[in-house]
Amino acid sequence: MDKKSLENIAAKLRLDTLIAINKAGSGHAGSCMSCMDILVALYYGAVNGVSHSRNGLNDGAKNASRPCVVMKFNPNKPRWDERDYFVLSKGHAVPALYAVLAEQGFFDKSEMKYLRQIGGLLQGYPNVKVPGIEASVGSVGQGVSIAVGLAMAIKADRENRNVFVLAGDGELQEGQCWEAIMAAAHFKLDNLVLIIDQNKLQLDGACGAVMNVAPLADKFEAFGWKVIPVVSGHDIEELVYAFEKAKNVARQPVVILAPTIEGKGVPFAENKPAYHGVPFSDAEMEEVMKKFGEVEEVGEVT
Amino acid sequence: MEKISTLMAFSEGLLEMGAKYRNLVVLDAGLASAMKTSKFALNFNDRYFNVGMAENNMVGIAAGMALKNKSPFVCSFAVFSSGRAWEEIRNCIAYPNLNVKIVGTHAGLMAGKDGVVHQALEDIALMRVIPNMKVFCPADYYETKAVMKYMCEDFGPSYLRLSKNAVPMVYDDGYKFKAGRGHIVKDGKDATIFSTGSVLSEVMLAVDMLEKTGLSIRVCNMCSIKPLDTALVLDSAKTTKRLFSIEDHQIDGGLGGVLAEVLSEAGAGIPFKRIGMNRFAESGSGYDLYRKYGLDSSGIFKSIKDCY
């Protein structure tokens, strides 16, 4: 695995995301930064290389010369019927996902300029009208249920496809998450992988202070899930191997607990709840540009 | 006369539609025995899922299944399926226009002895304000089956409102249902009664009594509340002199509310009385509640006769 290029991709996508949010004038900059490396691991990760499917099919192990990818998808055919599903349950982080999808070629990058604007394609929360977005998610707590439904339908059709769902740790305060978590174990959904972006912050402050959801590993184990903890949700290599391990678990759903840093990559915003649900100001963006300007191969920034 | 509830018709309809549509799946939330879904479950056990008492999760799961080309019927008491999971229905199903059918059973006062918490009197109002959602409230056995056939042929979300009380047949095997089309059960000149759901049987008894006093009454069955047959409503406002709506539901936001919107926007300027609920009820047998709150035939008769 080419660790350096994955990190460069993540840095570039961070910048794309922040520019789009800044232009939109609203959005959740901090939350997008905390989950970006997880998204890069899902969409670019491969056990034996980098998967960049901008001009072609990301079809897994069909061709031995291609890398063994984390997730199967095809930007030229978003509804490809062998693809894996990704559901973004923490829907407020959708600008980060848009940046990934645009970079992969699901839609034109120019759409990013019209994020959250009237008449634009890219809505403030995930919407199935956008190529590559699998589920419309309204408020937090609903995406895990949708992912459970997808995984159940895949099982009913006896297909070999996986469902990945990304949720925030604060989101687990929603009771519906636990209804879905109970159901996933009951139906033995070993094709379901839930990733918890543990940035430990929510709109009102620290999750632990607002309403503590810990200890998560114990809770998931008690609910019948296989828990795979990672040391850092920003170590893309570690995440890719965790996904590979998750895919090989049988007869139970898997949760990957990924500790992250809210605002990761932007030093002045790291671990600050004040940056959870706001864009950066123009002055702050200048600082961001300066920092990301140091990263190699950034390019294509408009 | 043979009597059967719209809920039992639903149970049979599921079996028939399940045989016809291989992508039809049924979701229950721990009320399977009350939903009468067991026939479907026995015949199609690989397409039947009981997710336990978790309505919000059930609706989310239905959204996920619909995203993978299933056609889920989501079943619970009308209070829960329409109310508890309202936001999931709005955001996860109606907004992306997914092919999910929401079923609300034990609707209205006929839920009876369980009392207010189980008597859905607001479900029509809750469902009809959501864009993309269709709302159907069938009156009898045959209409329920015809509506279910329509729902399966139609793509997109819809809400099916059912009652548990056995009611006489109004229609027969040949009845064809069409969304957005009301049905004139009986024509008349002096007044029009708009009815929705299985309270229609009480309406028909009341009309017999009213006609004996010399009134000529048109009865329109408005099973399709959304889309609404506005042409029939406005035609009735022109050809008859007085309008009434009758429903086992709150008059605000229900059939009465829908008709008031249509009539006032069209400037119909015609006397119009809404008969139904405008409060919470209480525990009691369904028919005792109908008597107390004026939804039985004699109560309906009195409400209408008072206007003359």
Image (tube, rainbow, N blue to C red):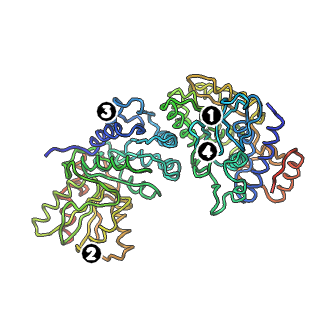
- Labels 2 and 4 in the same subunit: no
CB of mark 3 within 8 Å of CB of mark 2? no
Distance in Å between CA atoms under marks 1 and 4: 22 Å
**Which residue is denoted by mark 3 in the rendering?**
B39
Badge 4 crowding class, 10 Å Cα cut-off, few under 14, some 14 to 19, many 20 or more, is some
Distance in Å between CA atoms under marks 3 and 1: 35 Å
**Which residue is denoted by mark 1 in the rendering?**
A194
**Which residue is denoted by mark 2 in the rendering?**
B238
- Residue B70 in sight: yes
Determine the image quadrant of residue B188: bottom left
Along the polypeptide, which appears first: circle 3 or circle 2?
3
Q: Could you say whether the residue bearing mark 1 is in a helix, strand or loop?
A: strand
Chain label for disc 3: B
- Labels 3 and 1 in the same subunit: no
Q: Name the disc covering residue A78, or none.
A: 4
Q: Could you say whether the residue bearing mark 3 is in a helix, strand or loop?
A: helix
- Is B189 on the left-hand or right-hand side of B63? left
Distance in Å between CA atoms under marks 4 and 3: 38 Å
Q: Nearer the viewer, mark 1 or mark 4?
A: 4
Q: Position of residue B251 (x, y in %)?
A: 34, 61
- At label 1, the amino acid type is Leu
